[in-house]
Image (cartoon, coloured by chain):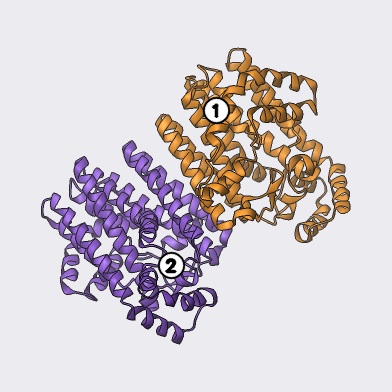
Chain colours: A purple, B orange
Amino acid sequence: MLGESGVLDQLGTMSRARNLKVAERLDHVRPLLAEDLAAVEAALAIPEGERAIHLSAGHLLARGGKRLRPICVALASKLGSGFGPRALDLAVAAELVHNATLLHDDVVDLGASRRGAPTARVVYGNAISIFAGDWLLIDALRRVRRSSSADVLERLLDVIDEMIVAESRQLERRGQLSIAIEDWTSVAAGKTAALFRWAMYAGGRAGGCSEAQASALEQFGQHVGLAFQAIDDVLDLAGNASVTGKVLFADLCEGKASLSIVLALRARPELEHSLRAVAETGLDEEAGARLTKEIASTGALDEARRFADTEVAAAIALLDAFEAGPARAALVGIAHAMTAREL
Amino acid sequence: MLGESGVLDQLGTMSRARNLKVAERLDHVRPLLAEDLAAVEAALAIPEGERAIHLSAGHLLARGGKRLRPICVALASKLGSGFGPRALDLAVAAELVHNATLLHDDVVDLGASRRGAPTARVVYGNAISIFAGDWLLIDALRRVRRSSSADVLERLLDVIDEMIVAESRQLERRGQLSIAIEDWTSVAAGKTAALFRWAMYAGGRAGGCSEAQASALEQFGQHVGLAFQAIDDVLDLAGNASVTGKVLFADLCEGKASLSIVLALRARPELEHSLRAVAETGLDEEAGARLTKEIASTGALDEARRFADTEVAAAIALLDAFEAGPARAALVGIAHAMTAREL
């Protein structure tokens, strides 16, 4: 199990990798969140000796992950009155919903590894992973219902609906690599940004901020979520598998049109034939390196990173609605970490 | 799409098959529910031209089914002030939750046919069926949140949790045919009775009945649900496939210990060897008929039916807490129909 310091160390590492200022900003986050994230981890821990459904869910949860969504809830709450029991429930719920979708996605995509370990479906089976995902989703909703006003629950239900529809849209389009940027954005907004949006909104409401401020936080979540997905897509082609814990070209091999692929095909449509061949037959390490180079030469990877930078800038601008302080500084750091991240 | 009269015709047929008195009782249900069930069907209809996720969910919903859970909600509400918009939302939600679990169960069990047609997973794929199940679940919860008091939503979340844990427990025990009756009961209570319990409670609350009455209705749902599952288990061995739309011995071939199997093995433990062989290799029609005869000769099928009769009697006794009237008479009829049913 990754403790709170592990999560923050990861964030520090990913920031230092790109620029020191981000790392310095995240040093402010450390004392600010240590206690809160420890409480989140304690709530996420599933007692030993439980049933297969709990083992399967626990297998994924115990691998840690970045805990970015709980961090968003916690920091948003600290823009106001702070991280109390209500914000804790919401932070845990955000992470549970995220993990529920991962369990189902891994069954849908036949994913073999995640967070550097075999997926829950490989260890405990597809069937139990389906039920484990259902169970985490219900557990998240129970926490939100018990601790929040009706609008926070209503928005979470809306967001989960958006996530499912986006995932299913992506599934329908599987194999279509040449799609419009707007189609990429709409899927990324649903499957990734929606939950960041909710995490920021819910945290803000738990901290007692105004409707207008909660709306600014939602937009922050939307921009940061799109940046996150854009970089995720870059890492699928140009990431370091030993850092990300993911297989390179996984999206491409699953026929998913990642942002860099969409941009590369817009710049050089004749690439489609060789990309399609990869999607159908896979590729070895050497061929992979060649392909990444070819895609990079179209400028697609840089363009995807610039897209993420623009989203991050838009996110940060929204924080002007809040007084300067450690929580706001930390959110700026988190936003920068989105584009600087290597996992 | 099966209209409201179709549902009631089915109920009538299943009742007439066993005793005329039940059929007569259900004749009272017809004018009582026609309009309400038409509204339920309209709300369950998924607009054409939607996405794969909607097509997949719609494929199952449009096959009709018995709509017993909406009928329970409607009749419970009619014990009080009647079936208004709130009860409609709850009736639809009960059916959506039921169908969500069917979509996921068919993926888990690799089910090939349901309600006399290929399963949604066969037509649209496992992946879309997983998302479609998620979507129906969220849709159900949104309806309940919007139309009900917090305790009705809280109880639905608890019930879905129970359903998932019971399904996963059944999955863990797959292949164990010789289990204690209590273990069968606890799985049946979670996977089947829990939702009947909620349907009765929710309908009662929507009709404005008292806490004590709502609790009696919950118990009614529990008994009726156990009876329903007991007969389901009998039909797996001795049903008419052309009526049930299900393959005979499906439970047994999936290694599930149905009630008749549990009872047969208690009476004649030496049967385990041949039952296990069937679970592993399947069987043809002739061998199936022989096996059913052998199980019947242990008295297990009769005992399972007697168990259902006892549960139905206990359910009906609980209705003494309500004034006589068409809704109460109809609930008595529904309870009797549980054991008389052929599908």
- Nearest to the observer: residue B4 or residue B50: B50
Task: Give the quadrant of residue A157.
Answer: top left
Residue at the far top: name it: B324
- Nearest to the observer: residue A212 or residue B98: A212
Residue labelled with disc 2: A178
Q: CA distance from mark 1 to mark 2?
A: 43 Å
Q: Position of residue A90 (x, y in %)?
A: 32, 48
- Chain of the residue where label 2 is placed in the rendered structure: A
Q: Position of residue B88 (x, y in %)?
A: 51, 28
Q: Is residue A334 visible?
A: no
Q: Quadrant of the N terminus of chain B?
A: top right
Crowd tier of the residue under label 1, counting other residues whose Cα lies within 10 Å: few below 14, some 14–19, many 20 or above: some
Residue at the far left: name it: A324
Q: Is residue B209 left or right of residue B228?
A: left
Residue labelled with disc 1: B39
Q: Is residue A254 visible?
A: yes
Q: Is residue B175 above or below residue A263?
A: above
Question: At 15% from the left edge and 59% from the top edge, which residue is drawn?
Answer: A329
Q: Amino acid at mark 2?
A: Ser
Q: Position of residue A27 (x, y in %)?
A: 18, 67
Q: Secondary structure at mark 1?
A: helix
